[in-house]
Image (spheres, rainbow, N blue to C red):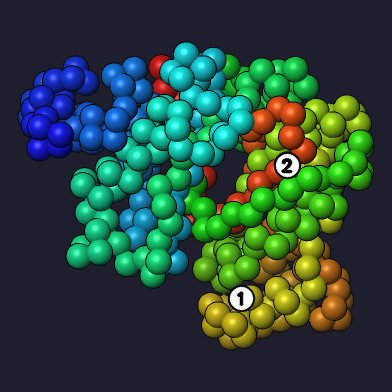
């Protein structure tokens, strides 16, 4: 019971009958939805999120791993505003019912259905708080001519899509200064480097080429970059060239400091053996700069937040421990 509401009552509120056989998933979605504070019209989004958890590519079984990363859900589509999702000021802050309640549903579903509790399967050392759902600013994207984030995964502008990936940490890139893309990129690239640490084991170590960090641009920054004639692909290419760190530091993150790379081979040796791209082994100079991803398309870019602020947010991704997965909803 939750606030005097039985499981049967909760499911009835969401329009779902008592389960039998394969209907148990809908029942579980509905019960946790009421406890989370969701509304009946949010049910299609929740169902898409449940489908992501069932997708082998996502890897829900890693949701209780020791580093305690938590999933971020990003929603796209014409229905986003109709469902009450906030994509403006405070886009990642509690308050807007849709963003907050749908994010809370994921944590409850993992706990109550998947068994991710400290007594069962959740072995996070610290853990993160529930992540608020991020809604992309569809109007800003249409205005500047950039595709939405869901296009990375085969969908089109206007499609209603929930996309999910697990994030380890995030930092603000505040007060980005400049009137051109060329002026802004170095600061954004530096933020992506600073948020990346042991996660680089998903470039090579715990996985190969699975690290896909997220850059969230305010609409003002996105417009400024687009006004320079840059596409989103142009921005990714520039980030690939500038979001780099010394090879020795990369090797410390994946080897000396974490012991997560078998044999602790140098990046030069790994590149020579064809295990990482050539860009990682252009020389054996430990001070040479190497990329933080295996190719430019690994960067994931979203546009959201206060349209009058020149800030960005960057998040490090946990690779195969909750890989980027998207599902459409009606």
Residue 227 in view: yes
Task: Give x and y (percent) for residue 10.
Answer: 15, 27
Q: Residue at x 66, y 80 (%)?
A: 252
> From the viewer's perspective, is residue 276 above or below residue 264?
above
Which residue position is annotated with label 2? Answer: 311
Q: Quadrant of residue 138?
A: top right
Task: Give x and y (percent) for residue 90.
Answer: 57, 35
Q: Residue at x 33, y 46 (%)?
A: 107
Task: Give x and y (percent) for residue 190.
Answer: 78, 58
Q: Residues within 10 Å of mark 2 (few under 14, many from 20)?
A: many
Task: Give x and y (percent) for residue 261.
Answer: 57, 78
Q: Viewed as shown, does residue 271 lie left or right of 138?
A: right
> From the viewer's perspective, is residue 324 above or below residue 96?
below
Give the camera-side residue of 179 and 214: 179
Q: Quadrant of the N terminus?
A: top left
Q: Secondary structure at mark 1?
A: helix
Give the camera-side residue of 125 and 214: 125
Question: Is mark 2 in CB contact (under 8 Å) with mark 1?
Answer: no
Q: Where residue 254 is drawn, which disc sits there?
A: 1
Give the camera-side residue of 61 and 224: 224
Q: Residue at x 70, y 62 (%)?
A: 194
Alpha-carbon span between mark 2 and mark 1: 30 Å
Q: Residues within 10 Å of mark 1 (few under 14, many from 20)?
A: many
Q: Quadrant of residue 141?
A: top right
Q: Quadrant of the C terminus?
A: top left
Mark 2 / mark 1, whichever is N-terminal:
1
Give the camera-side residue of 192 and 172: 172
């Amino acid at each position: 019971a939750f606030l005097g509401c039985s499981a049967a009552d909760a499911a009835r509120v969401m329009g779902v009958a008592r389960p039998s056989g394969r209907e148990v998933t809908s029942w579980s979605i509905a019960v946790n939805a009421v406890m989370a504070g969701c509304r009946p019209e949010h049910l299609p989004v929740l169902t898409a999120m449940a489908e992501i958890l069932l997708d082998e590519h996502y890897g829900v079984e890693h949701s209780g791993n020791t580093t305690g990363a938590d999933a971020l859900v990003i929603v796209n589509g014409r229905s986003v505003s109709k469902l009450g999702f906030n994509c403006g000021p405070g886009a990642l802050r509690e308050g807007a019912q849709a963003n907050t309640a749908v994010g809370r549903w994921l944590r409850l579903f993992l706990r109550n259905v998947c068994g991710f509790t400290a007594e069962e399967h959740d072995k996070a050392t610290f853990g993160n708080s529930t992540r608020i759902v991020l809604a992309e600013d569809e109007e800003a994207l249409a205005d500047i001519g950039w595709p939405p984030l869901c296009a990375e995964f085969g969908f089109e502008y206007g499609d209603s899509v929930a996309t999910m990936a697990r994030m380890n940490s995030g930092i603000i890139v505040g007060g980005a200064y400049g009137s051109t893309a060329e002026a802004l990129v170095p600061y954004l690239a530096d933020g992506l480097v600073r948020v990346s640490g042991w996660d680089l084991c998903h470039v090579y170590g715990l996985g190969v080429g699975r690290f896909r960090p997220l850059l969230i641009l305010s609409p003002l920054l996105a417009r400024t970059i687009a006004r320079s004639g840059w596409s989103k692909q142009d921005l990714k290419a520039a980030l690939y060239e500038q979001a780099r760190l010394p090879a020795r530091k990369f090797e410390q993150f994946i080897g000396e400091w974490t012991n997560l790379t078998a044999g602790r081979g140098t990046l030069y040796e790994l590149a020579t053996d064809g295990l990482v791209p050539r860009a990682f082994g252009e020389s054996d100079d430990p001070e040479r700069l190497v990329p933080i991803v295996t190719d430019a398309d690994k960067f994931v870019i979203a546009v959201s937040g206060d349209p009058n602020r020149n800030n960005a947010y960057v998040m490090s991704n946990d690779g195969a421990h909750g890989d980027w997965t998207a599902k459409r909803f009606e």
